[in-house]
Amino acid sequence: MAPNMNQDISTSLNTAMTDVADKIEAEINKHLQIEQPEDSVISEPKLIQAMRHGSLNGGKRLRPFLLMQAANLFCVSEASALRAATALEMIHCYSLIHDDLPAMDDDDLRRGQPTVHKAYDEATAILAGDALLTMAFELSSHEETHANPAIRCEWVAALAKAAGPHGMVGGQMIDLEAEETTLDLSGITRLQRLKTGCLIEVACQGGAILGQASKAQRDALRGYAHDLGLAFQIADDLLDVESTEEETGKKVGKDADRGKETFVSLLGVDRAKAQAALLAEQAVDHLSDFDHKADLLREVAQFIVNRRS
Amino acid sequence: MAPNMNQDISTSLNTAMTDVADKIEAEINKHLQIEQPEDSVISEPKLIQAMRHGSLNGGKRLRPFLLMQAANLFCVSEASALRAATALEMIHCYSLIHDDLPAMDDDDLRRGQPTVHKAYDEATAILAGDALLTMAFELSSHEETHANPAIRCEWVAALAKAAGPHGMVGGQMIDLEAEETTLDLSGITRLQRLKTGCLIEVACQGGAILGQASKAQRDALRGYAHDLGLAFQIADDLLDVESTEEETGKKVGKDADRGKETFVSLLGVDRAKAQAALLAEQAVDHLSDFDHKADLLREVAQFIVNRRS
C-alpha cells in the first residue's frame, strides 16, 4: 500500500518516498514470513501476524527514507542501506506498538487501523513489540547489512544508543511523567529530542556510518537531523490541533485532552508554524557542503513542515 | 547481595557462582548509573531506577555463569566474557519484567521483592524492559566486549536470534496460548526449548563465539546446553509443585492454578525427577572431550536438578 503523500510535494520527492516505502514494506514482509513448525500444534504464527500488523501498515517510512538518502550521499549500496533502514523502521514500529498500549497512551487507532493490542490483545502486543526490537538487531548484525563487521558494529551501537534509555525510551519515560508535570519550552525540547529526535538523527547517522563519512560530513548530517527532528515534532503538534482523524488516521486533539504541554500550547499556532519553518530552513543550511545528491534531503525538510498527515 | 545457593553443592561451585553473581551485579550497576541531566526538571532517573529494580536483585545469574564457564574453556579474557554475560543477563531480566506484567503472568513477587510494575507502574515496567533489551545490544556491540568486530557481530546476531520471535519471545507466545490449549509432551518440550532453552543455549554458545571454538566444540556445548535447558525447566516445574514461596521468593503452584500442563503434570513427580536426572547426566556426557576446565559446567548440571530455589 502506498503511503499518503502530500499533493503539493514535488514529483521527484513523491516518487522517491513512495519507492522507499514500497521497498521497506517488501523487506519487512520478507523477514516476517509465517512458517508453521512441524513439531507442534501451536506456535509463533500469532506473534508473527501481530508483528506484521504493527509494521506492514503503509507508513510514510520517513526514517528509512532519511537513512537511504543519507547513505546515497556516500554511494552506499542500496541493499546495504535498505537492511539498516528496515531495522530502524522495525524499532520505530515497536515503539508505536508499545506506545499505544493501555498502560501507555491507550490508543485504539493507528494509521486508520486498530492498534496491535486492539486487533490482538495486550500480551501479544507487548511481545510483538519486543520481537520487532530484537529482530532489528539481528538484521543489523548480519553480514548482508555491510561486508565490514566493524561498520555493522558501529551501526548496532548507534541504533541501540538512539533507541535506549538515554534516547527514545528515555524520551517516552519523560513523556509519561510530563502528564503530571508542567514542562517549559526547554523541557519539551529535551523530551522531543529524545523521543522523536534520536531515531531521526540515527537515520541520518546510519547513512554516514555505512558510507564511512568524514567527521565534517557527519557533523553536517547531525545538525540537519537535529533541526529536522524538532521541525517534525512541531509539525506533529500542529497536526494534532489542526487536522482531522480522517487525515491522520489516528486520534487528534489528544495532547489538549490530557492537558499536556506541546510546542503549540507553549508557543501558539502562529509562532509554532514560524518556528517549524525556520528549523526546516536551518536544517537545509547544514547541507551546504553537499551537492545535488542532497536535494531530496533538502526537499523533505519542507515536506515535513507542510504535511497534512 | 549473594544469591541463594544450595547447601549441598561443592564449595568450588558455590564460590564460582557467587563470584560470577557478584561481578554481574557490579557490571550491571556500572551500566545503570543515574545521571541527572542539567537541562530539565524531569528526566530518566525513574526509568533507570526501574531498570535497576528489575536487574539488580541478587539472582543466581545462571546464564552469565554458563557463558563465563564456556568462555573459560577457550581462554577468553574475563572482561570480554563478563560484558557478553551482562548483556545476556539484561535480556533475561527484561523478559522477567515483561513476563510479570498484568497482561502476561500478572505476578506481584519476584525473588521476594515486588515486581517492577508493582514497585513502579505498568508503563514504567514496559519501558524498563524495553530499555534493558536495547542496552544489551549496545553493550554487546561495543569494542570492550571483544577486540574483533566480526566476533562481536556474531555474538549480537546469536543473542538476537535466541531472544527473538523464533527463540525466547516465540516461546513466551506459545506459553500464553498454552493456557487455552492442551499441550502434549512434545508441545511442552518445544515451548520450553524456546522460552528457556534458547537463552541457556546462547549462553554456552556465547563462550564458544568469543573463544572462536571449533565446530566440534560448539556442537558439544550445544548438546550440553540443550539437555541442561530441559533439565532446568523440569526442575523448575518440580519446584513449582514441591517448594514454598519462602524458598523460591515467588508464587508457587501457579501452573496448576491455571490448569497449564507442565513436565510434572504430564509425567508425574517421580518420572519428572528421573527425567531431569537423566538429562543432567546426558548434558555432562557431551563434555567428554573437554578436560578439567569443564568441571564446573559438569557440576552445575547436578546443581540445576537439585536446587531448592
Image (cartoon, coloured by chain):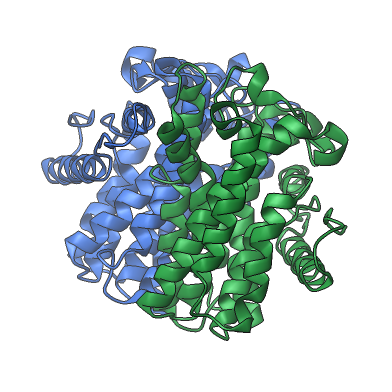
Chain colours: A green, B blue
Viewed as shown, does residue A66 lie left or right of B23? Answer: right
Viewed as shown, does residue B242 lie left or right of A87? Answer: left
Viewed as shown, does residue B38 lie left or right of A175? Answer: left
Viewed as shown, does residue B208 lie left or right of A23? Answer: left
- Count how many numbered circles sit on residues in the image: 0
Q: Nearer the viewer, residue B268 or A220?
A: A220
Q: Is residue B235 visible?
A: no
Q: Nearer the viewer, residue A161 or B221?
A: A161
Q: Quadrant of residue A111?
A: top right
Q: Residue at x 40, y 69 (%)?
A: A219
Instruction: Residue A225: give x, y in percent of width and height.
Output: 51, 60
Instruction: Residue B212: give x, y in percent of width and height.
Output: 33, 76
Q: Is residue A34 visible?
A: yes
Quarter of the C terminus of chain B within the rendering: top left
Q: Is residue A236 above or below residue A280?
A: above
Instruction: Residue A191: give x, y in percent of width and height.
Output: 46, 37
Quarter of the N terminus of chain B within the rendering: top left
Q: Residue at x 67, y 17 (%)?
A: A257
Q: Nearer the viewer, residue B219 or A7?
A: A7
Instruction: Residue A163: give x, y in percent of width and height.
Output: 48, 49
Q: Is residue B88 above or below residue A139?
A: above
